Amino acid sequence: MLKNKYILEPMDLTVEEMDEIFELAEDIMENPAKYAHVADGKIMATLFYEPSTRTRLSFTAAMLRLGGQVMGFSDPSASSVKKGESISDTIKTVSCYADIIVMRHPKEGAPRVAASATDLPVINAGDGGHQHPTQTLTDLETIRKYKGGVEGLTIGLCGDLMFGRTVHSLIKALSRYKNVRIKLISPKELVIPEYVRKNVMEASGMDYEEFNRLEDVLPDLDVLYMTRVQKERFFNEDDYIRLKDFYILNAEKMKLAKPDMIIMHPLPRVNEIAKEVDDDPRACYFKQMRMGMFVRMALVMKLLGLEA
């Protein structure tokens, strides 16, 4: 029973609960009219303390397609945050008006503070370099749909593994599936954080290897998950400039990949995937983006206890 539960990281959901969300998302995709009014009278508050296009619009579209309404802010300077209001007080205020809260914040752990200040369901839409659970749900459902399941796959995670919250969240979720092999591909400056390595991968006995060159591992992959080097996480712009083009997936490199490998990306991309790859049938990142809306529709329904 997910009603009124907060979702701050992937481990807040059991594998069975995730499967329920995926099955509901698939039904929504097939029968959208059936769900067009299930959230009539409900209001979602989207509190985005950090820039977002896909996640914020995806949640907004999800709630509107369910028949609900959306309020909130996409720029904290347009709210009382600019006056120094605490997260806790903002959440208590919003709780007077909304039924469910979606929050993105640059500081790790901020959504947990929010969840402690309200009885409403709170969804973490990304906190710093920490977690991004609804992107993880989107990623898992994309893999399920286009690879027929998750177990037994070889999955490459490429790019910014140090600061990439989507990668950290996905690794956490994948640690619960059997026989998943992880290939970590990054420059030495952007390797996976030690806490993810020890507390998640090693603690779960996950099969993983680390590589510096994408070409060395590309032929073995069932899934390639590309990520951008995140300028906003760097303190030194010189380091960002040096590393931002470290990996560029192009048509020539794709010749090394399996015919049925899928390419994923949480987006936005900068130039780590060449535009020419968009026409490759293995490119799933825009399909993945659309999948996120249906997954979020399903999650919102579960958290609000709504049924068609």
Image (cartoon, grey):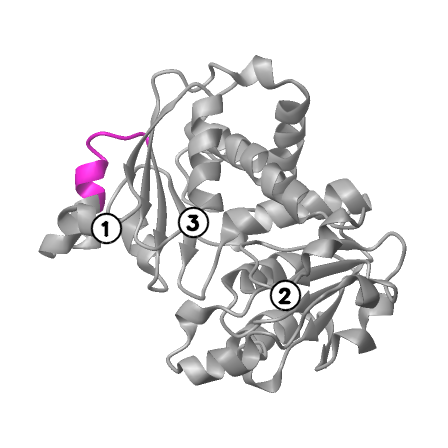
Type of amino acid under label 2:
Glu
272 magenta-colored: no
Q: Is residue 276 above or below residue 145?
A: below
Say what amino acid the circle numbered 1 marks.
Answer: Pro
Label 3 crowding class (10 Å Cα cut-off): few <14, some 14-19, many 20+? many
- Measured Cα–Cα span from mark 2 to mark 1: 30 Å
Looking at the rendered image, the disc whose residue lies closer to the viewer, 2 or 1, is: 2
Residue highlighted by disc 3: 125
SS category of the residue bearing label 2: loop
Q: Are marks 3 and 1 in contact (CB under 8 Å)?
A: no
Give me the residue at 41% from left, 76% from top.
234
Q: Secondary structure at mark 3?
A: strand
Please identify the residue farthest to the right as the structure is shown: 259
Discs 3/2, front: 2
Quadrant of the rendered image containing residue 233:
bottom left
Question: What residue is disc 2 on?
Answer: 272
Residue 223 located left or right of residue 87 = right
- Which contiguous range is marked in magenta? 91-99
Q: Which residue is mark 1?
A: 76
Mark closest to the chain's N terminus, 3 or 2 = 3
Residue at figure coordinates x 55%, y 49% from the top left: 135
